[in-house]
Image (tube, rainbow, N blue to C red):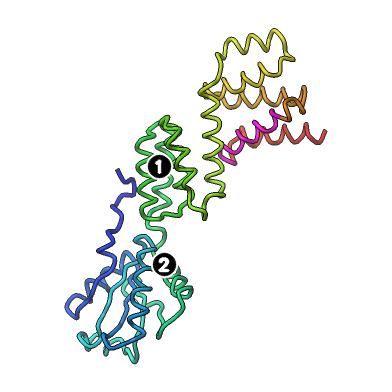
Amino acid sequence: MLGLGDKPQAQDDLIKDATEASFLADVIEASQTVPVIVDFWATWCGPCKTLGPMLEAAVKGAGGRVKMVKVDVDQNQRIAAQLRIQSIPTVYAFWQGQPVDGFQGAVPASELKAFVDRVSALGGDGGLADALQAAEDMLTEGASVDAAETFAAILEEEPENSAAYGGLVRAHIAIGNLDQAEVFLTAAPAAMAKSKDLDAARAQLELARQAANAGPEADLRAAVEANPNDHQARFDLAAALLAADKPQEAVDQLLELFRRDREWNDGAARTQLFIIFDALKPQDPIVLSGRRRLSSMIFA
């Protein structure tokens, strides 16, 4: 299950050789839905042999948000004449049937990537934002396997999408595959390893590990009622409440523990609160209220 509405663009469909007969379909018509970069080249052109492979790599790296068409000017002189190609390599970008950007001659790899990124942006994100939201909705509704598949499909199109990577980890946590979730976190690319999305996933994994070892909620609640200063019992009760999907009550217990003894167990209550805040969405009412209450205690 992809969850994107369409299958990811096949790599062998991203790059084509065009002829005079196919140019209309491959470039003008195709650019109505996705930007198309056209590389005008020739077999005798030395710079073309360097630029072409670099351009192909950048297009493939764009994950289907742009296509590339190669036109041999010697074999397709009419197209070259119509577009007034004076020298090669020449590269044009088409969007919705019109040339919108381009350059002549060889350019550094950094400029080439910037060009491809700029052209890719013309067509939007290819539905990735909608797919991410759909996957998050699946996760919220308990369809964790479907969510994991959708997050994985997004990563096929955009491997460094930290929101999708974090979502994939959280989906495996929801399924109960904690070891697999940890493998994903350990193997996260450096570019996204410190992102907020992965920080949230790490926090959720830590809470899930704790939940697996949580004691009986009723027994812990009774222990706290019998002795309100039994800090360990209160801390363990918060873990049991999290395991029972009662994050608000867990936060309440930890705030009460912090109020009673903020330095207990090296500030464990505060540390646990921050883990919970990281695991939830930043705008979650539990987070907003909890942070305000904690701050008022710290600065009282």
Residue sitting at 55 percent across and 20 percent down? 214
Q: Is residue 262 above or below residue 123?
A: above
- Gap between marks 1 and 2 measured at Cα: 25 Å
Amino acid carrying label 1: it is: Ala
Side of 6 where 54 appears, left or right: right
Query: x, y (%) of residue 226?
Result: 69, 7
Q: Residues within 10 Å of mark 1 (few under 14, many from 20)?
A: many
Query: x, y (%) of residue 17?
Result: 23, 74
Pair 1/2: label in front: 1
Q: Nearer the viewer, residue 214 or 35?
A: 214
Residue beneath disc 1:
135
* Element type at mark 2: helix
Q: Nearer the viewer, residue 251 or 42?
A: 42
Tell me where the magenta segment starts and ends, as one range: 268-282
Query: x, y (%) of residue 229?
Result: 74, 15
Magenta stretch encompasses residue 279: yes
Residue sitting at 28 percent across and 52 percent down? 7
Residue sitting at 43 percent across and 42 percent down? 168
Amino acid carrying label 2: it is: Leu
Q: Quadrant of the C terminus?
A: top right
* Element type at mark 1: helix
Q: Nearer the viewer, residue 267 or 147?
A: 267
